[in-house]
Amino acid sequence: MLAEFGRVSSMSGLKYWSISDERWQVLVERSEAVTGPDHPEVRPDFTPAELQPGRDLYFRQRENRGSGDIVYRLHVLASGPDGFSVDLANASGIDFMFFRLFAPGDLRSVYFFQRLGGDEWGYWAVGGTHLGMTGVFGAHIGSFENRAMALYRHFAGVPDDQEPPAAIEE
């Protein structure tokens, strides 16, 4: 399961339920592993050997609502045969049009995966933000829920638009 998390390029084309547009749409247009946060060069996806606790790895995504590429830091907190946890934070600023929505480090999520038995896994996600400009536009909790569910469906192998959305309104 952790190896799947390291295949960041597989998130290209990831869909989610857009509350504002009331339809399934692509959330991640492009996703690729990069060499670092400052002058990122594209590199192959992360190998299981690289996904070690305490190591910082970086990937870049083009998302549907952003004005440019966003570099994220992936940090494995813990890893073992029956589970792992991963901390993701934006390593670059996130802009929309002419507004800086999030400064580097303002958007953070921690994902917990625990083997429940056999091939069954539990998934928990905790996210937080420094409000920045989102305080002006609103918190959009439903959008965060739908994005977390999109990641769950991706890692669980569930088709993007098969399940009903987690939230249909803010």
Image (cartoon, grey):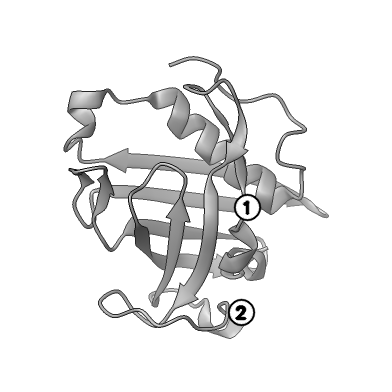
Tag 1 residue = 13
Q: Closer to the camera, 53 or 58?
A: 58
Q: Is 90 left, or right, of 7 in this rendering?
A: left
Secondary structure at badge 2 equals: helix
Q: Is 28 left, or right, of 96 in this rendering?
A: right
Residue 128 placement (x, y as % from top left)? 31, 40
Q: What amino acid is found at the position of numbered circle 1 in the picture?
A: Gly
Q: Closer to the camera, 3 or 24?
A: 24
In which quadrant will I find the C terminus? top left
- The residue most toward the right is 118
Residue at horizontal 52 percent and vertical 23 percent from the top: 21
Residue 63 placement (x, y as % from top left)? 45, 50
Residue 7 placement (x, y as % from top left)? 62, 69
Q: What amino acid is found at the position of numbered circle 2 in the picture?
A: Pro
Closer to the chain start, of discs 2 and 1, is 1
Residue at horizontal 35 percent and vertical 59 percent from the top: 70
Quadrant position of residue 53: bottom left
Tag 2 residue = 48
Q: Is residue 106 visible?
A: yes
Residue 128 sits above or below residue 137 on the image: below
Q: Closer to the camera, 1 or 39?
A: 39
In which quadrant will I find the N terminus? bottom right
Q: Nearer the viewer, mark 2 or mark 1?
A: 1
Q: Mark 1 packing: few (<14 Cα in 10 Å), some, or many (20+)?
A: some
